[in-house]
Amino acid sequence: MLRAISVIVISSLSPIAQSAQTVRATASTGDQAYEWLEAPHDPAAIAWAATRAASTLETLLADPEAAVVLKEVRDTAKLASSPPPFVQPYSVLGDTIARFVKDSDHPAGLIQTAPRGPKGVGGPWRTVLDVDALNAREGQAYGLPVLNLSTACLPPEYRRCLIPLGIGGSEITQVREFDLRAASFLDEGFHFAPAKTEVTWLDENTLLVAQAVPGGDTLESGFPSKVRLWKRGTPYSEARPVFTAGPKDAFFRLTAVGIGKDREGVISAARDVETHFETFVVAKDGTVTPTNLPTAAEYPGNLGLSGGTTRYVVVCAVDPVTVNGRRYPQGSVFAYDTWAATPPNQRISLVYAAPKGTYLDNAQFGFAFSGSHIYMVTRRNLARSLMVATPGASGWKVKTLLRLSPGDAISLWGGSLASDAVVMGQESYLKPASISLIEGERCCVPISTSPAAFDASKFLTEIRTAKSRDGTWVDYYLVRLRNPKPGPTPTILSAYGGGGGVIAPAYAAKLLDGALVSWLNRGGAYAFAGIRGGGENGRAWYRAGTLRNKPNGLDDVAAVAEDLIKSGFTTPERLGLTGRSYGGLMAAAVAVRRPDLFAAVLDGVPVTDLFPAKNSVGQLSTLKGALGDPDDPEDRAVMLSYSPLQNIRQGVHYPRILTVCSTSDDRVGPGPARRFTAKLEAMGLNPLLMEGPTGGHLFPKASTDPDAVTAEAMFFIETLMR
């Protein structure tokens, strides 16, 4: 049995005044008893977790209402999984449209194509790859990551594609060359060993590729360290290195710009995990040229790639920046012209400078690029707009194509370098996703609308504001019944607050891992807080909740909870908290800092210990730039004030806690969740643990794990509604 342990008690509600020596001792006192649970695939640790997972499912599914909720979860999953199932389901491939369909009948997914016509889809859909059938043939459990075929396939024909087959829900992929027209993998095509892989086409016979190969080519973060030029017909071992990341770099991304003989590769190297990316252009002969674009830029997934008559690399600066002798505000967008016959430092032009109070939306899905346009989503006072930028002889012309109501979300993806079209998705908490095509400056050609999973007319979405501990005002969404029942409303509060990302509203059928509709239809409410550490109000908002400022975001969550309680909307006995990944860290930390505010806390795939002696967390080393360095005394003191494992205290009445993780999660790993649960048990509490064997960082999903999702729903229904 695990023995009870003692810890040094530190109040999270007052400033920390400890010496570095005391802090260092505190972080390790007594927690060695749980280190054996850290190794993801240790048989004893798996058996320990499996016993608790079975008990959790038995406990939460024993209620007779669980069978009703299970049916609701399955029915909702079928509707919510009708195309489009993900934020990136469609791609424009010249005169073809491709989509990725994943539902309960095809849990691993289908890739389908159709001709593109004047009204969007110009013909019937044809299945070119059935991943479930592939798994049956090969005895595997492949899945597809979020897939953008417009970058995975080589323009302008878009016939040859590099398909990443995810292994067991992890970030390890086996990339294979696929013929989209023949609907088959090429026996003699490029074929990769399973690894964390980055790859892009230079031409039909040449790739830029990087693999995290065991024993070499690997950064401390676990990502690849070298970019190689790989020629068809040669072994990967002979691929020539053309770029090596610095030893402390976090990762890099590979993509390309241009078509045919003029195509060039692009490397975006992350000098730290969040904010600094250095961008390089790679010629077909392997020559690497720095672009001198601003390095304090958004996540490199937003690189603007235009083809045809123009060829630009585009980034969004997250700080005020001086370019070519002029000062520009944060949020300014710049383009680097790879065709210009001028020195590199003279090839940069301003695309867009955001007015004060206006912010560019989610970097990963707030940009898209066609052959001659750049599309951007901006956000001002929570209202989003769609902008289009077009290059010309006298500079860039920017105009507004579409204005959306507050609370509506918009995402962009899948643009084609061989045409002038991109894909746009729209949804809100109460409206299912719809997909349209943007053709040049014409918006928009409808493609599809997902069916409604519930009657949304009974609900409304509000935007409220809470005052945080230091006086900062924090906005949050509240989805509730139009005519609530008398008394406090059972409410689930969620937040993320990490990486500077903006978590836009999503259809309720997709939230709480697919169980939110069951919750709402029983009279519950859902709130989401845009806390510091996210990017809701730009990079300054992010920095105000990261590193030594991380506790600000946790205070923001507590402030929203207090606002919901003080307003009379709910009570602590009817209030729950949930979050995943960064949000899982948030939920676990707030649970132990402010247990008085909540009756139920679900922390998903969380980092629960910022000081692990044996660290299996795949990317924890890359999070130093966001959370702090445990070896720095001042960072360590702040981290210790909220690191969940170290702040569990004997004799405190904690909320009911359910921790969810996956054995196959190589981004965080199951170890932190196991050890957090074990320490709560050692304190004489009764925490719940649900560890899935597969599913990775996304476990659970309603389409593949309906029992687990039902258990999550019952956790809140039982605790907050009864």
Image (spheres, grey):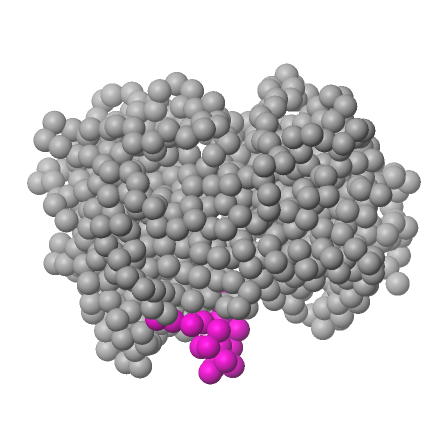
Q: Position of residue 194 (x, y in %)?
A: 44, 71
Residue 661 in the image: above or below residue 137? above
Left or right of 480: which side holds 313?
left
Q: Position of residue 54 (x, y in %)?
A: 78, 66
Query: Residue 545's image quarter?
Result: top right
Residue 487 in the image: above or below residue 250? above
In the image, is residue 135 part of the stretch drawn in magenta? yes
Task: Determine the residue positioned at 62% across, 35% down.
Answer: 459
Residue 258 in the image: above or below residue 401? below
Task: Determine the residue positioned at 75% across, 37% down.
Answer: 490
Q: Position of residue 615 (x, y in %)?
A: 63, 56
Towards the viewer: 635 or 178: 178
In the image, is residue 249 part of the stretch drawn in magenta? no
Towards the viewer: 87 or 647: 87
Residue 457 in the image: above or below residue 564? below
Towards the viewer: 685 or 58: 58
On the question of residue 23 being in view, the answer is: no
**Which quadrant would the C terminus be assigned to in this image?**
top right
Task: Determine the residue positioned at 44% across, 77% down.
Answer: 134
Question: Which residue range is magenta in the image?
Answer: 128-143
On the question of residue 45 being in view, the answer is: yes
